[in-house]
Amino acid sequence: MALLVSMVLEGAGETDPLSIKDYESLGGFAALRAAFALEPQAIIREITGAKLLGRGGAAYPAGKKWEQLLNIEGSPKYIVCNADEGEPGTFKDRRIMEAVPLRLLEGMIIAGLTFNSPRGFIYVRGEYRRLQRRLAEAIQILRDAGYLGERILGSPFSFEITTISGAGAYVCGENSALLNSAEGLAGRPRIKPPHLAEVGLFLKPTLVNNVESFANIPLVLTMGGEKFLQAGHPQSGGSKLVCLSGHVRAPGVYEVPLGGATLRDIIFSPQLGDGIRDGRELGFFHLGGQSGPLGGPADLDVPYAYYPLRERGLAVGSGAVVALDASVSPVEYLQKVAEFFSRESCGKCVPCREGNKILAKYLQKLQIPGAWTPEDERRLSDLMVAMRRASFCGLGQSATTALASAQKLFPGRFAGASAPAASEA
Amino acid sequence: MDRNATPPAALAVTLSIDGATVTVPAGTLILEAARAVGSEIPTLCQSDSLPPRAVCRLCLVECDGASKLKAACATPVWEGARVVTVSPALRRIRQTILELILSDHPPDCLTCPRNLNCELQLWATRFGIRALAFPPKGPWPKPIEDSGALVRDMSKCVKCGRCVSACQDGQEVGALTAAFRAGQYEIVTPFRQALLEGPCVHCGECAAACPVGAIAEKDESEAAFRLLEGSNATAAIFSAETLAGTEDFLGYPPGSVTPGNMVAALKRLGFFEVLDRAAFARLAARVEAEKLSRALEREGTLPLIAGCAPTFRAFVSARYPEALKFLSNAISPESLFAFWMVDRFRGAPLPRPARAVSFQPCLARKLESRASAANQKGGPAVDLALTARELARTLRRASFDLRALPATPFDPLVLGPSLTLPDAPAASPLAEALYAVQREGEKGRPHAKGPGGALREFYVDFKGEKLLFVLVFGIQAARKVLERVLDGSLKAAYVKIMSCPKGCLGGGGQALETLARLRMEENGAGDPAIP
């Protein structure tokens, strides 16, 4: 298997991102045309067979999500694309929207067709101003060509897509907070149940998928679920865009087949990261964004795919891989992570709002020689459990993931090596 | 579809909670079902009759042996569920959460208005918290006193959002909201405008909802003592609702303290005369009857809409300015009392100076008093308007046994020859009808369920016609009525709006003990179990 593939990013950098002709020359819109001849169940069967896992970070099976929405009564159903891309170290959705926006839009139109939805919305990270304009342009071009708007390709199906700008809150990457923000409410997560599939945007049944997930949909339909699965890992089909950054010689977005590359390949292969800069050693790496775990040199040979990483206590998450050289102090690094969460908590629930503030203080204290006490040890452990198990949404629940993994990775460096935090339930 | 939709309650669901089997209607929340088997789950952000917020996370429970915990206040039961509400892991998590809340809370319990009646204090005590894991540091923001009725000491705020929910979901006023994020997350007025500048009706539902001492009435009981020290001609009025609150606050059984006991207590505190508020309410009804009979003769001015307090006008100005023309400039019993006091000692040599103090479970009254900067009209106004809570605290301080005080009759309301009441109206059947409606509004609707307020209709015979009087509880219901008035679909002669959803008895200035009692009565036996 090749280390790099060109599936989601096929045509990126080589074709005009806003040219329908260029996109069609690569097989673009064949999937949409095929979808018109398929029953919704048949479309979803392919996605389920493809084992396409949600690419935003939570890795929820896309087929299952679509199936659930299909089984829900009520109309209209809305299609929402999560393009908030707020995880630090993650910049692959940006690459898709920059280079192959039509693939994303095709995926959304297929979703619209599947659920007979009238409207799709793309919630784009506030800082991506230029991309918001590009998407709006791409939408207009598709409308002019009859791929969007009234009676698409002469069929009875009509569908519109609108972009919505985020305003800079990390928590709006959480789907229910995203929908609140899209509705004009404060970007804070909602109580579930009811689930978004039932009570979503403007209280209507709603599908929320990540940019990369939508961009994979045309591939699933053109390749067929089975071939898509074969192109990846037996438990998770297709490719993954990896956002490689940190102290590597060649940072960037790379598309690897799931299970077809190891972390060593990603960081050290001359085709990808090309090793650590300035002749230094790899110290550790951070996967999947700030909410993801840390891994070390001993983890390098794990195949980059959802299940193999999970078995090792690691995660694909958003696809971020931040490699750090041995000069970086993991405690200092994690203090920055904790400060990030203590800024980005939406503030409404106690464990996340208050816990992250105190977690950041503990990480400071860990750096003061001789300051750490067994009492701190016990308190930190309790705090981590409470934050992980009691926080309202994924933000607070995953804010301690990096620290918990670091305690195992660097026994001794974190006084918490013996803490039961990670093992309890 | 409702964001907080619950399934129809027709079906029964059987589940186990802490090993006990219970059958409850589908849609019952785990929290409610747990009460039925005697498991009290700690809560702070939850309040009955308002939508769940699930933000304090104290009520998390274990379900079906899964590691993922569920918020009992927001999760409906399901068939066959196995719920555990008490376990070592849950205890540690809850204790950590309490410690986290206390890490951002000033340790000033002794001087807090909610000392010994605080939900945070209650749970901290029950969890046996002796030392703070994360000691609070401050600096604390200063209390905001921007209304003359409410004080918002946000240093005490635990950000549970109950006040916001009471104001937005319960009353649909929208004077409070949550803003900012992370450590800056706080409960504010929109754009930090002063409460007096927004739609706030000063119902005090926020203060009544607050589990801690963050939002409370501006306590003027000390000022009342000073008033008594400087005057030997201070008169007071109180109502039956105030008496009920005082009883509950001081722990007397309902109905065991007579108005005569209370009159005696107030006189012992130094009040020169004590009158029945109801006497002035009757007078107010007569004034109102005059206005209504004039409105009945004119075209296009019905219904005459009367708010229970002038603050309702602020709300109508902010939200329904086109309805202002229907609004009556009703004079309150408190203002009439002040009128009477001015008249009472006119030209009299002694005793002086005459002062008037009213006691009512009402925060809006404070804005009508001379003590309030909001009252700039300079008309007759009581010197101080105290809530039932402040009266109860004052009496507690005096340590009387109210029931042992010799019953003393109310001082009579004597209308002197010089009393210049507006239009000096006489008693009439219309006035009696208006008084009856007013009284119903004061007595409240203790058994009506739900936060939305409610309507009651009265038909009144007047000159051979049947007039419709509508009594409205709460601003949420008032909004709907105003909309019906504006679109012409409500054919009423008179609309009385009580700002508080539970009337004066359940008013925002009522003793919290009374409010808790009313909630319990509202929830029936408090037991959702199907026998």
Image (spheres, rainbow, N blue to C red):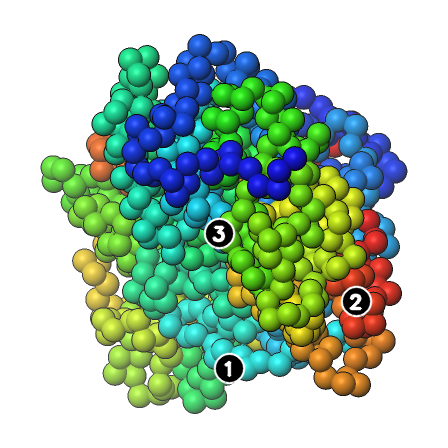
Q: Residue furthest front?
A: A270
At horizontal 58% and vertical 61% (from top left) the residue drawn is A248
Query: Badge 2 local density, few (<14 within 10 Å), some, or many (20+)?
Result: some
Q: Nearer the viewer, residue B108 or B188?
A: B188
Chain at numbered mark 3: A
At horizontal 32% and vertical 51% (from top left) the residue drawn is A130
Name the residue type under label 2. Answer: Phe
Give the residue at mark 1. Answer: B222
- Label 1 element class: helix
Give the residue at mark 2. Answer: A410
Name the residue type under label 3. Answer: Phe
Q: Nearer the viewer, residue B422 or A148?
A: A148
At horizontal 25% and vertical 47% (from top left) the residue drawn is B320
B413 lies left or right of B218: left
| Residue A227 visible in this rendered orientation of the protein | yes
Nearer the observer: mark 1 or 2; the answer is 2
Name the residue type under label 1. Answer: Glu
Query: Badge 1 local density, few (<14 within 10 Å), some, or many (20+)?
Result: few
Query: Badge 3 local density, few (<14 within 10 Å), some, or many (20+)?
Result: many
Disc 3 with disc 2 on a shared chain: yes
Give the residue at mark 3. Answer: A91
Q: Residue furthest left?
A: B299
Q: CA distance from mark 3 to mark 1?
A: 62 Å
Residues at circles 3 and 1 in contact by the CB criterion of under 8 Å: no
Q: Position of residue A246 (x, y in %)?
A: 57, 63
Instruction: From this view, report whether residue A119 is shown above or below residue B207.
Output: above
Q: CA distance from mark 1 to mark 2?
A: 61 Å
Chain at numbered mark 1: B
